[in-house]
Amino acid sequence: MLKNNLEQVKANISAACKRSGRNIDDVTLIAVSKTKPLSDIEELISYGTTEFGENKVQELVEKYENVSTPVNWHLIGHLQTNKVKYIVDKAKLIHSVDSLHLAKEIEKEAAKRNVIANVLIQVNIAHEDTKFGIDESEIFDLIDEIKDFKHIKVKGLMTIAPFVENPEENRVHFRNLYQLLLDIKSKNIDNIDMSILSMGMTNDYEVAIEEGATMVRVGTGIFGERNYNIV
Ligand SMILES: *Cc1c(COP(=O)(O)O)cnc(C)c1O
């Protein structure tokens, strides 16, 4: 099942790239393995998957330590400052930086370990009350602070779009985030590299790609439905 699902998702990514005149090499698929067993991850690794996303620090660390082949781990969920120390040297990319408070903690822990933390700034592009992420009106102030941090490299932006029936409803949000990325990029700020745009999940990754996503985070589409009762 995993193999077929993965092939289907890759075919959809490829088709979305063709429709929008984009190069398939510019879109990275992150397999979101939260709640799924290590055996599923091992199986996907055998098909060549190298990028995995988790939304909980403890689960990421456990899988990081137990997987048989080293792969790249993406922390895609909300990050509490008291947990930064556990993942700052394990996550290839932290997708969810949305405050100066959190950035300061990442800087501190990365400095201790003498590593550079690669991060994305999470933007609440649809202004949903229920979502984490910074408002776009505050992003330039945040960037202005983070740009001087020696152990953080800002690589781009991330968003979690609203849950909608029809993915077309999210097109406007993806388009707005892409525009914001271009605005920031055009300012050529030192240490602020806008090469990654992480947007699109199972329900809407094809639309996200058409609107400029360079990373899509797909869970259900690859692994099937999640069961939160079995942990
Ligand atoms: C769970 C999750 C995903 C994947 O969701 P699916 O709808 O299963 O593809 C993507 N991004 C984040 C931040 C998530 O928490």
Image (cartoon, grey):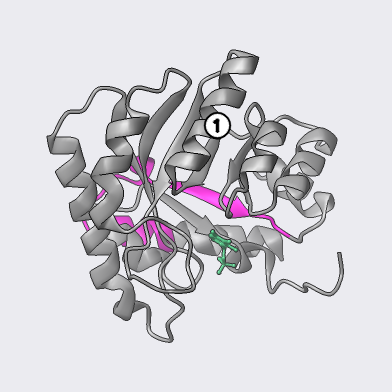
Q: Which residues are magenta?
A: 12-34
Drawn side of residue 100 relative to residue 197, left or right: right
Drawn side of residue 64 relative to residue 195, left or right: right
Q: Residue at x 41, y 23 (%)?
A: 149
Name the outermost residue toward the top. Answer: 114
Helix, strand, or loop for circle 1? Answer: helix
Q: Residue at x 70, y 46 (%)?
A: 57
Residue at label 1?
A: 106
Residue 26: in magenta span: yes
The C terminus lies in which quarter of the figure? Answer: bottom right
Q: Position of residue 194 (x, y in %)?
A: 29, 37
Res 72 quadrant in image = top right
Drawn side of residue 230 relative to residue 215, left or right: right
* Viewer can see residue 80: yes
Q: Nearest the camera: 100 or 122?
A: 100
Res 227 quadrant in image = bottom right
Q: Position of residue 230 (x, y in %)?
A: 87, 70
Q: Nearest the camera: 134 or 5?
A: 134
Can you tell me which quadrant of the image ligand 1 is in? Answer: bottom right
Q: Position of residue 208 (x, y in %)?
A: 34, 62
Name the outermost residue toward the front. Answer: 101
Instruction: Using the image, determine if residue 70 lies above or below residue 217.
Output: above
Q: Residue at x 48, y 30 (%)?
A: 118
Instruction: Using the image, determine if residue 133 lies above or below residue 99.
Output: below
Q: Amino acid at mark 1?
A: Ile
Q: Position of residue 218 (x, y in %)?
A: 54, 60
Drawn side of residue 92 relative to residue 163, left or right: right
Q: Nearest the camera: 129 or 158?
A: 129
Residue 193: in magenta span: no
The N terminus lies in which quarter of the figure? Answer: bottom right
Instruction: Using the image, determine if residue 30 lies above or below residue 61.
Output: below
**What is the tally of numbered marks visible in this picture?**
1
